[in-house]
Amino acid sequence: MTMATSAAPAAAKTAKTDLDLERALYLSVAVFLTMVVTAVITWGLPALAMTALALVPLVMTVLVLITVGK
């Protein structure tokens, strides 16, 4: 077995893992948006305001990480 053929399965495994992670992230975003839309349809504008209020710590963390450069 040469070095090129032994590295191929590792690269395929990494690509599959990355694809699974990406799929999970997109699926979680889709589920979250579906829940927000359902809440807004059910309770109206207060549901949208509560969602925005709940996301403030997440957005602040992202802004700090962007500022620090990570």
Image (cartoon, rainbow, N blue to C red):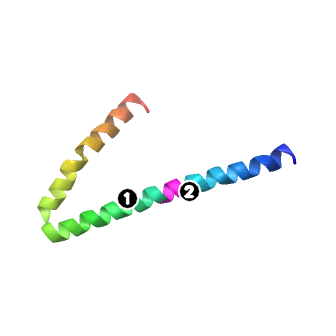
Q: Nearer the viewer, residue 6 or 65?
A: 6
Q: Is residue 22 a member of the stretch shown in magenta?
A: yes
- The x and y percentages for residue 28 are 39, 59
Observer-nearest residue: 60 or 35?
A: 35
On the rendered structure, is 46 left or right of 62? left
The single residue placed furthest to the right in the displayed view is 1
Place residue 47 in its image quadrant. Answer: bottom left
Q: Earlier in the sequence, mark 2 or mark 1?
A: 2
**What element does badge 2 sit on?**
helix
In the displayed structure image, the side of residue 61 where residue 2 appears, left or right: right
**Residue 29 numbered mark, or none:** 1
> In the rendered view, does 1 fall on the left or right side of 8?
right
What's under tag 2, amino acid-wise?
Answer: Leu
Residue hosting label 2: 19
Measured as percent of width and height from the top left, residue 61 is found at: 31, 38
Answer few, some or many: residues within 10 Å of disc 2's Cα (few below 14, many 20 plus, some between 14 and 19). Answer: few
Mark 1 lies on a secondary structure that is helix
Instruction: From the top left corner, tell me how far across and down residue 31 is, in percent.
Output: 35, 64
| Residue span colored magenta | 19-23
Q: Three-letter amino acid code at disc 1?
A: Val
Q: Residue at x 18, y 71 (%)?
A: 41
Q: Is residue 8 magenta?
A: no
